[in-house]
Amino acid sequence: MERVSVSWIFRACLLFMLIGAGWGGVQAEQLSQTYMPGEVIVRYADIGSGTAIASVASSLNTDIGADIIYSEEILGKKGMQVVKIPDTTTVADAVRFFKSSEYVRYAEPNYVTYIPGPIGGTENSISEQGNESSGMTIPNDPGFYLQWGLYNTQNISSERADISAPEAWNIITGSADVIVAVIDTGVDYNHEDLAENCIPGYNFVSFDDNPADDNGHGTHCAGIISAVTNNSIGIAGVSWNSKILPVKVFDSTGKSNIALEIMGIKYAEEQGADIISCSWGGNNYSEALKETIDGSQALFVCSAGNEELDIDETPVYPAAYNSANIISVGASDENDMLTWFSNYGTSSVDLLAPGMDIYSTLPGSYGFMDGTSMAAPFVSGTAALIKSQKPGYDTIAIKNVILNSVDMKSWLESKCATGGRLNAYEALSRIRPLTAAFKAEPISGTIPLNVQFTDLSSGNPETWQWTFGDGFESGLQNPTHVYMKPGKYSITLTIFKEGLSSFAEKDDYIHVKPPYQPVKAFPDKTGGDYPAPTDPDDDGLYEDINGNGWLEYEDPKLLFDQILFAIKEEPVGQFDFDGSGFIGFGDIVKLYQMV
């Protein structure tokens, strides 16, 4: 699917508008709205029983003339209410009124949050990949060849700049036991490439059980995370089998508020979500939202925003909260550069992930989008793969694996805390069991045989010990070794990590042959030729001189005839093994050794 090309000048103008407007995507008159008119979130202190809190809240609400919109039962947070104040009272005055009570922990406006508007992009230029490479799992989804963020063949020489998804899938493709909540504009849960992986969700905009996507943003994010994969339809998801929980808190224009987001988070927790994907944000710090996130056991993956700002200085929330269970994600392009629109910050942005020209699902179709909104789902999907591999891992463990396994890039050190881009394969490699494995190439040949050994071990070993079977050893991860004597050699590899070890051995794995070539056929003095000698046991020694398939008396007799012929008829040629210019005793000995 192609898109209309967007010029650089248009992008620059769009960026200017985004910076001025915050998180766009809604009508112009809404962009200046920072909180819901007349609405205040109040969190009461824990003063004992729920009855005591209710009594204090009722008294304060009566004093200011406020009515409860959402109770603590709906919000899922003890002592929290959202109230509607009279038109005669400003939100700022109401916040001050509630804060003046010793029984109130905090009070704040019900801030408005926006889904990022479409950034635009260029026509797609990703070419089709070649055949499957060793160590990769390539799905049969036709749109996979447009998903450079999973497998980028445009810059193989510069390490691909993708998340190494085919290599990651060679380890695991995800588990249906892992639930990822997409708190967004909803999801097209009937989509041909999503239906199988979607579970029933909820719509907090209209408060019903139909979280259908009337915007497109949420469906695009969901496809990146867990589109049904290897089904010969559409695209591939990062985690093939994890379940998507659609949680609609943004309306068709891309607008939501803190209260709806809190309800969405509490609902996701109740439904067993392990990971919560949040491709949205705003510039207003909300104690209520941060407290809700801090109190959750889920991992929150949050987009950093699209205003090309340093959010260490101009924060975007929730990405910029210092919560231990948040991963903040900026966007990279197909050359491992920070995209032109992505926010950044060495403290507030943890890592980058692909976020330019991202092909994914849309309601009833497929298409491209740009943004940190697209980058965050790559991380959410990777977190789902890790949870699938290690079900016992908690939020902090998953976060640490992701952040400690990025592809480091020196030019990203000033853009994010890790200085790197997401690598799903490296993350999964670090949590695999410590298991030794290796290969060698070539495994057969004549002296001198130069063999390259390659470590294929899992579990991210720290040290290696090789024995090559000929008395030599190496402590390198991928050593080379030269064999100078004929024979069959057994190879062993022992790997070590944090006091653990694993051992792999291959018996008679390397086959080293003498440095001789087989002799050619000789005239038999009857008008024909004797056959070329053969090597039936593949040891470099040519015993079957007459080539009839077995060894017999005629073989050494024929050898003797060939030796005589060599001496008399070919003073130089194929039998001059030592390069002396004539057939000598040494050459005859070597010829004899061949049998």
Image (cartoon, rainbow, N blue to C red):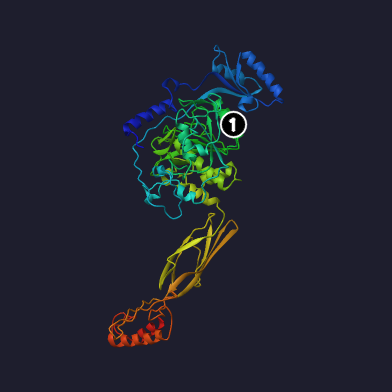
The quarter of the image holding the N terminus is: top left
Using residue 281 as the reference point, say whether residue 72 is left or right of it.
Answer: right
Q: Is residue 350 visible?
A: no
320 is higher (above) or lower (below) than 549 = above
Residues 572 and 364: in front is 364
296 relative to 594 in the view: left or right: right
In which quarter of the view is residue 247 placed? Answer: top right
Are there few (<14), some (14-19), or many (20+) residues within 10 Å of tag 1? Answer: many
Image mark count: 1
The residue beneath circle 1 is: 267
Question: Which residue: 55% across, 52% down?
Answer: 432
Mark 1 element type: helix
Q: Nearer the viewer, residue 58 or 16?
A: 58
Q: With 333 as the anchor, is 489 left or right in this view? A: right
Give how far across and how far down residue 31 sits, in percent: 44, 23
- Residue type, mark 1 in image: Tyr
In which quadrant will I find the C terminus?
A: bottom left
Q: Quadrant of residue 309?
A: top left
Residue 471, position as x, y percentages in the image = 51, 72
Direction top: furthest residue: 88
Q: Is residue 545 above or below residue 308?
A: below
Instruction: Determine whether 431 is above or below 312 in the image.
Output: below
Instruction: Please state the horizontal and vertical placement of residue 565, each as a whole percent of the image.
Output: 31, 86
| Closer-to-camera residue (477/299) | 299
- x then y, percent, for residue 96: 58, 19
- Whether residue 386 can be seen here: yes
